[in-house]
């Protein structure tokens, strides 16, 4: 393994040099934001010229942002859905230019019940990969030692199903993995074929079966930090299975792995590694656990989202992974990659002004008929904005409903960080609580009480006066009596963060936050239900830390918590699976469920 790693590091010197030059070109372009964006707009309009959308909106003669805004309104996905439906049916020229070849559709959940299909084209994929490479080479160069070690990266299948026109639909991460050169693939400890395992538990177990067997992992990459926590919990919960499989060259979840995938990963899995198994057994004997900080001693970097609600999970990573540098890999979505962070410990990154054309609406003006629309170079440090995208996928002035903050500038190009989705604002009496505020309040309260919540969600509940419920699993606390003090602390921190909330609380228009304890496993079941409805994957899933729906609390109790609690009590009538504070709501949920 060491010889292979050293050889790969040497052979990779040439492509790394090329990528460094490309990253340098990006940084040089970012020195003149306005010029870069003007050229990108002209290029993108030319790319899809001749499409029906372009003709209907008379875009062929557009030469600047002012003309562009007169032709195309700010729009969400529903504006483009009719055109995309035609593209799905095989009529690509409804939205795309003749030279803009369609490769796949990236699936993501929408604000309606229907999934969104984002066209991924040759140009889009090239831009996407270029952004990743610019990020990656700077991250690797900043952390010597990653070059000759393995990378654990989770991806999803890009070909889950086909449209009527025959185009693959899935996740762009799978397409990127499929397009990697052979030398690049040797850098990753888990083959891309694992993404095709449909059973989510089997996929995660197979991932860890391959990854735990590899002592030489230097970087772990995934979108959501909650996934890393999930992987650590899995390796500890199934340590006996993992050690036995590694020793015997087997896979405990083999029955859930399609036969056609065995050819792709069977050789890796069939290797018997008694030495590694003995190392892992020694770790368990010494610590009583099997977690990444012990079985991956060579990790140099964790790469994941840290902005918005994702930041709530960061304090819980150190216990399982150790005190490691964390680098956000940028604000990105199925619709496009938006930023390239160049430093550890911050979600802020340089706006990727060489691939998409960006516009911004000040947060305070959002929703007004005459809202100001700014170009990237016009942002102000410390101000919040809704970000609009024009991309090579045929999306124009697309409102992704993300709220970002300008944190500063790289020369003339803004550095921005993700705060929250615009939809994630709750307001019962004008308090306008944002998801990022909830995350900050819960994190501060958790730190103060020295507890770590695996997941949590705050939601409004109507009453006289109305209030907010803080939901988290009772197993996250050492004792049930800590729940109410934690909720009180969250309430206090939220008052210090949000002056409108403080005013509503002091005037009695809002009651204090109330803790709603949940049975263990609630969030796992909740996530599965949400993914089943949206068609999303485990890697794409983002747990909501704030849900504005007034019915959320009762629905969660009735549809998820009550069945779990009932099942736990059937197995052992002597246990009380939830804290006493939730019993009235649980009883009401049981009655509602019949």
Image (cartoon, grey):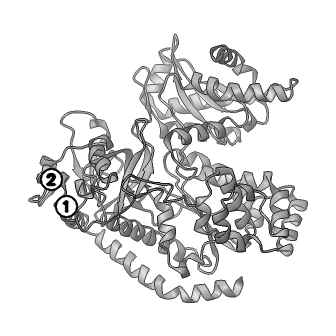
In this view, the residue in front, 327 or 554, is 554
Q: Secondary structure at mark 1?
A: helix
User: Marks 1 and 2, how far apart in space?
Assistant: 10 Å
Q: Residues within 10 Å of mark 1 (few under 14, many from 20)?
A: many
Q: Is residue 439 found left or right of 575 in the rendered image?
A: left
In the displayed structure image, the side of residue 264 where residue 78 appears, left or right? left
Kindly state the secondary structure of the residue where label 2 is placed. helix
Asked if 384 appears above or below 171 in the picture, the reply is above
Q: Are marks 1 and 2 in contact (CB under 8 Å)?
A: yes
Picture quadrant where residue 191 is located:
bottom right
Q: Can residue 531 be seen by looking at this rendering?
A: yes
Side of 324 where 88 appears, left or right: left
Task: Identify the residue under disc 2.
Answer: 68
Residue 528 x/y as whole percent? 61, 41
Above-or-below relation of 430 to 543: above
Report whether residue 66 is seen.
Answer: no
Tag 1 residue? 45
**Residue drawn where x is 31% and y is 74% of the image:** 28
Which residue is situated farthest in the left direction here? 61
Residue at the (58%, 74%) spot, across then down: 143
Direction from residue 17 to residue 12 in the image, left or right: right
Give how far across and how far down residue 374 sits, in percent: 23, 50
């Amino acid at each position: 393994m060491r010889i292979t790693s050293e050889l790969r590091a040497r052979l990779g010197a040439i492509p790394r040099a090329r990528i460094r030059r490309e990253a340098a070109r990006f940084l040089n372009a970012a020195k003149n934001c306005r010029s870069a964006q003007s050229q990108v707009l002209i290029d993108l309009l030319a790319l899809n010229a001749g499409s029906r959308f372009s003709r209907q909106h008379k875009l062929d003669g557009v030469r600047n942002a002012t003309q562009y805004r007169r032709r195309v309104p700010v729009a969400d996905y529903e504006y483009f859905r009719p055109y995309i439906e035609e593209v799905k049916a095989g009529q690509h020229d409804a939205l795309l230019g003749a030279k803009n070849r369609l490769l796949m559709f990236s699936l993501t959940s929408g604000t309606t019940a229907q999934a969104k299909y984002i066209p991924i084209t040759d140009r889009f994929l090239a831009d996407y990969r270029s952004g990743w490479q610019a990020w990656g080479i700077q991250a690797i160069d900043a952390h010597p030692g990653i070059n000759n070690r393995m990378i654990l990266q989770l991806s999803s299948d890009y070909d889950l199903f086909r449209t009527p026109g025959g185009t693959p639909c899935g996740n762009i991460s799978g397409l990127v993995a499929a397009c990697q050169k052979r030398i690049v693939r040797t850098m990753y400890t888990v083959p891309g074929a694992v993404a095709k395992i449909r059973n989510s538990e089997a996929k995660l177990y197979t991932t860890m079966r391959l990854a735990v067997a590899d002592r030489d992992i230097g970087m772990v990459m995934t979108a959501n930090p909650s996934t890393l926590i999930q992987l650590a919990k899995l390796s500890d919960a199934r340590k006996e299975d993992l050690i036995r499989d590694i020793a015997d060259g087997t896979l405990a979840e083999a029955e859930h792995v399609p036969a056609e995938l065995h050819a792709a990963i069977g050789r890796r899995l069939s290797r018997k590694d008694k030495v590694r198994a003995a190392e892992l057994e020694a770790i368990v004997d010494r610590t009583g656990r099997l977690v990444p900080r012990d079985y991956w001693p060579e990790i140099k970097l964790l790469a994941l989202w840290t902005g918005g609600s994702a930041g709530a999970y960061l304090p819980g990573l150190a216990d399982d992974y150790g005190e490691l540098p964390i680098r956000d890999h940028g604000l990105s979505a199925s619709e496009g990659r938006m930023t390239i962070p160049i430093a550890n410990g911050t979600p802020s990154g340089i706006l990727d002004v060489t691939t998409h054309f960006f516009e911004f609406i000040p947060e305070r003006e959002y929703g007004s008929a005459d809202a100001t629309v700014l170009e990237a170079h016009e942002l102000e440090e410390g101000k919040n904005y809704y970000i609009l995208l024009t991309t090579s996928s045929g999306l124009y002035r697309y409102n992704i409903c993300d709220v970002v903050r300008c944190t500063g500038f790289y020369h003339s190009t803004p550095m921005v960080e993700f705060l929250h989705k615009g939809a994630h604002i709750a307001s019962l009496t004008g308090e306008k609580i944002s998801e990022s505020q909830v995350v900050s309040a819960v994190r501060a309260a958790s730190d103060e009480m020295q507890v770590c919540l695996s997941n949590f969600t705050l939601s409004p509940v109507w009453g006289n006066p109305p209030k907010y419920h803080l939901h988290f699993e009772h197993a996250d606390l050492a004792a049930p009596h800590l729940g109410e003090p934690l909720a009180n602390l969250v309430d206090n921190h939220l008052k210090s963060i949000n002056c409108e909330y403080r005013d509503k609380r002091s005037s009695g228009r809002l009651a204090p936050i109330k803790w709603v304890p949940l049975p263990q496993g609630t969030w796992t079941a909740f996530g599965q239900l949400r993914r089943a409805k949206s068609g999303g994957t485990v890697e794409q899933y983002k747990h909501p830390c704030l849900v504005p729906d007034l019915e959320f609390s009762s629905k969660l109790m009735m549809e998820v918590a009550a069945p779990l609690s009932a099942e736990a009590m059937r197995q052992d009538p002597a246990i009380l699976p939830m804290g006493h504070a939730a019993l009235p709501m649980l009883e009401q949920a049981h009655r509602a469920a019949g």
